[in-house]
């Protein structure tokens, strides 16, 4: 079976049916993972008893396959009477999986700020809260922008995992076309190109954001 | 130096303030990092208007001592009283006490994401709740005092080391401190920039600011200090007027240290 370029073009609209959900899942998962990752990092910094427990949880999250976590949530939660829509489970699963990595991004971003910065703020009589809000956080934001940006693309590329729990998204649409037409090469090719375009758009947004943060602040 | 500095003026001022409380009282202070003892029963008194220079070999506890005075480090034993308020670990109102002591660090520690002006006004606006216009006015005054007002809208990275350190001094002055603490303010500077910072510090001294300076700039110590303190291995070894300290130090370790410094 030869690759049929005309056929590939023809099925673009059908594959695109899933693009809305792909973007929705990616964006929601990115925000979920970032919030949860920040929460882990705050927990890790909170108390010396909480720290090792949190570290263990983060390591566990990062060391289990995302697919296992998603299946687990989707098939195991209903046993306990928790029945959630597939989309919700999918977003939660991806958020959870990536939060482990993103907590490390926050950790590195905060660790990179010299201790002298908060010491200077405290010595000026600023309170702890103001020190974090006006001195630590803006510098952390600059440090995390780039790695967070690459995880946003990682999350986008992981959305097809949700095909296994039947969340309608772009890979699902492509698979539908394939099973209707018995042709796989073209739908997969189209899906791949569309993901590439989405990833490029995301990279562009990240670059713009980084530039803006770079204007606000650079070097120590 | 930029101007002539007469010791007699200092003495007059010193006497005027003789009856008021000391700016800083340190009594028998000991401090440990884990099991390592960094300060051994240190006692020092600094009168209002007095200029103290602390010197000593690297690792002798100079930074630790000066950082205890605004509780960036907590001491475990002894008493530290700043302008009549005793500092206790975890005390309430620590931020208020810290406002009495402006701190200048070896590495400047300017906020890289803020302009020079905002570096100076942040504490005024957030901690003292002074409106931006008024805060800017105060900051510009202080920046003029360290002769760098024309750089107010630049970011720290656009300035030389000497300029950054002068901004750091202005930033500390903005909180209207009663004491200024300097921790090796010229040690991270290229040699040609040391003078501009020392000149600013000398001006401050001339204006009557109470100062505690950790520094190895012996010319500055000779000219400005009322007293020089030598520390070694976490303890105060010797304490004397600069004249005596440099010409006839009593302790062998002080003699050795000064000899090394001259070579
Ligand atoms: N945060 C810390 N933890 C452990 N040891 C420290 C810490 N800060 C300083 N020290 C130790 O305390 C001693 C005194 O240090 P410091 O006050 O910085 O000396 P100086 O400023 O005179 O060079 C040194 O031996 C140093 O290694
Ligand atoms: Mg030091």
Image (tube, coloured by chain):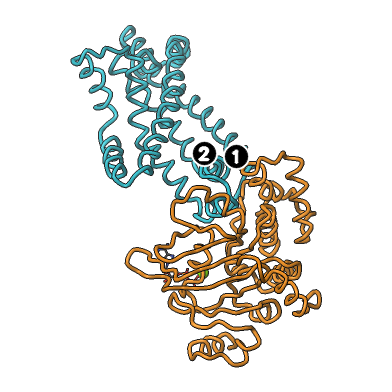
Chain colours: A cyan, B orange
Left or right of B25? Residue B88 is: left
- Residue B86, position in %: x, y? 51, 59
- Residue B236, position in %: x, y? 49, 78
Location of residue B172 (image quadrant): bottom right
How crowded is the residue under tag 1: few (<14 C-alpha within 10 Å), some, or many (20+)?
Answer: some
Measuring 46% from the left and 75% from the top, which residue is drawn there? B60
The quarter of the picture where the C terminus of chain B appears is bottom right
Measuring 47% from the left and 71% from the top, which residue is drawn there? B61
Measuring 59% from the left and 83% from the top, which residue is drawn there? B240
Q: Which residue in the protein does label 1 denote?
A: A213
Location of residue B47 (image quadrant): bottom right
Q: CA distance from mark 1 to mark 2?
A: 8 Å
In the rendered structure, which disc, 1 or 2, sits on the residue that comes first in sequence? 2
Q: Nearer the viewer, residue B44 or A148?
A: B44
Residue A192's disc number: none
Q: Nearer the viewer, residue A9 or A165?
A: A165
Q: Which residue is farthest left?
A: A79
Disc 2, SS: helix
Measuring 75% from the left and 49% from the top, which residue is drawn there? B138
Left or right of A28? Residue A120 is: right
The quarter of the picture where the N terminus of chain B appears is bottom right
- Residue A163, position in %: x, y? 32, 17
Left or right of B166? Residue A132 is: left
Q: Chain of mark 1?
A: A
- Residue A55, position in %: x, y? 30, 42
Callouts 1 and 2 on one subunit: yes
Q: Are marks 1 and 2 in contact (CB under 8 Å)?
A: yes
Disc 1, SS: helix
Examine the rendered structure and indicate whether residue B239 appears above or below residue B13.
below
Q: Which residue in the protein does label 2 denote?
A: A145
Q: Chain of mark 2?
A: A
Examine the rendered structure and indicate whether residue B98 appears above or below residue A182.
below
């Amino acid at each position: 079976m030869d690759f049929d370029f005309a056929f590939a073009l023809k099925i673009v609209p059908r594959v695109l049916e899933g693009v809305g959900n792909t973007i929705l899942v990616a964006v929601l998962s990115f925000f979920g993972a970032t919030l949860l990752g920040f929460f882990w990092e705050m927990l890790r910094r909170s108390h010396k008893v909480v720290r090792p427990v949190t570290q263990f949880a983060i390591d566990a999250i990062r060391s289990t396959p995302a697919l296992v976590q998603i299946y687990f949530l989707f098939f195991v939660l209903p046993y306990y009477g928790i029945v959630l829509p597939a989309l919700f489970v999918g977003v939660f699963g991806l958020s959870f999986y990536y939060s482990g990595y993103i907590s490390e991004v926050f950790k590195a971003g905060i660790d990179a700020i010299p201790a002298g910065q908060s010491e200077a703020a405290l010595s000026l009589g600023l309170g702890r809260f103001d020190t974090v809000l006006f001195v630590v956080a803006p510098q952390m934001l600059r440090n995390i922008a780039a790695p967070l940006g690459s995880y946003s693309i990682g999350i986008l590329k992981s959305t097809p995992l949700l095909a296994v729990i039947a969340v309608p998204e772009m890979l699902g649409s492509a698979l539908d076309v394939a099973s209707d037409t018995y042709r796989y090469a073209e739908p997969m090719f189209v899906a791949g190109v569309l993901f590439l375009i989405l990833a490029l758009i995301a990279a562009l947004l990240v670059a713009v954001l980084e530039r803006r943060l770079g204007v606000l602040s650079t070097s120590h | 130096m930029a101007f002539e500095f007469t010791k007699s003026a200092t003495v007059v001022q010193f006497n005027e303030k003789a009856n008021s409380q000391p700016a800083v009282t340190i009594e028998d202070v000991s401090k440990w990092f884990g099991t390592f003892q960094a300060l051994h029963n240190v006692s020092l008194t600094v009168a209002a208007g007095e200029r103290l220079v602390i010197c000593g070999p690297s690792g002798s506890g100079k930074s630790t001592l000066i950082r205890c005075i605004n509780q960036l480090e907590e001491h475990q034993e002894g008493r530290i009283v700043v302008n009549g308020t005793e500092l206790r670990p975890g005390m309430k109102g620590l931020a208020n006490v810290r406002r009495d002591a402006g701190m200048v660090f070896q590495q400047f520690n300017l906020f890289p994401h803020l302009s020079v002006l905002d570096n100076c006004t942040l504490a005024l606006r957030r901690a003292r709740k002074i409106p931006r216009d008024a805060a800017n006015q105060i900051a510009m005054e202080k920046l003029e005092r360290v002769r760098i007002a024309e750089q107010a809208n630049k970011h720290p990275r656009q300035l030389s080391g000497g300029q950054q350190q002068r901004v750091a001094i202005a930033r500390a002055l903005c909180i209207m401190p009663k004491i200024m603490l300097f921790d090796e303010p010229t040690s991270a500077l290229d040699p040609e920039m040391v003078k501009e910072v020392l000149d600013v510090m000398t001006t401050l001294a001339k204006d009557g600011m109470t100062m505690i300076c950790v520094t190895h700039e012996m010319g500055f110590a000779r000219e400005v200090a009322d007293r020089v303190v030598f520390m070694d291995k976490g303890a105060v070894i010797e304490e004397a007027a600069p004249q005596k300290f440099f010409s006839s130090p009593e302790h062998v370790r002080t003699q050795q240290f000064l000899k090394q410094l001259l070579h």
